[in-house]
Image: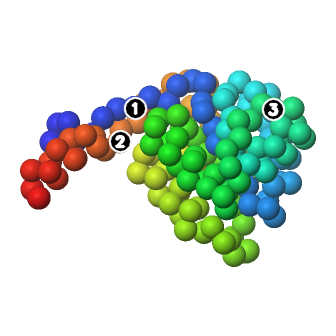
Amino acid sequence: MIDEYVTLTIKKQKNIALIAHDNKKRELIDWCKKYKDILQNHKLYGTGTTSRIITDNTGLKVKGFNSGPLGGDQQIGAKIVEGVIDFIVFFSDPLTAQPHDPDVKALLRIAQVYDIPIANNKSSADFMITSKFMNEDYDHKVLNFNKNIENRAKTL
């Protein structure tokens, strides 16, 4: 079907969500310091505590949402659906149980649905932030949700 997918553009100036579990916050702060010259050219967003400590420790302006366990992950997921967030750096802690793990999984799922780049550790974040795509527009195809709804409504 020709209109099954639509092309979306991630602009040269990215809208980047910065998230870190407690045991990874220091690592994310250090990463932000290392790439401050790049990050300051983009719009930054983050969950509550993470956004605050990045701003306090780096001087980068980060728009904060709620803390992850208080709905911040869900707020960022909603911003993906709205077309606001188009890049995620999420330093997750795979060795510590998280009480809001279902929220984290929902965020990662919605990022996959919308074909949003996700770095979930320092190595992947390093590769992504230094990619040639950080300095240019990037077109990607996502499911045409309106067409999908129209087709489903016809079959139900």
Q: Secondary structure at mark 3?
A: loop
Q: Residue at x 74, y 35 (%)?
A: 62
Label 1 – label 3 distance at C-alpha: 27 Å
Figure quadrant of the N terminus: top left
Q: Position of residue 138 (x, y in %)?
A: 48, 30
Look at discs 1 and 3 and give the one toward the viewer: 3
Residue type, numbered disc 2: Val
Residue 127 appears anywhere in the view = no
Compare residues 73 and 142 and report the one nearer the observer. Answer: 73
Q: To which residue does mark 1 refer?
A: 8
Residue type, numbered disc 3: Leu
Q: Residue at x 30, y 35 (%)?
A: 6
Which of the 4 image quadrants contains residue 92? bottom right
Q: To which residue does mark 3 refer?
A: 60
Outermost residue toward the right in this view: 57
Residue 143 appears anywhere in the view = yes
Label 2 – label 3 distance at C-alpha: 31 Å
1 or 3: tag closer to the N-terminus: 1
1 or 2: tag closer to the N-terminus: 1
Q: Position of residue 139 (x, y in %)?
A: 42, 30
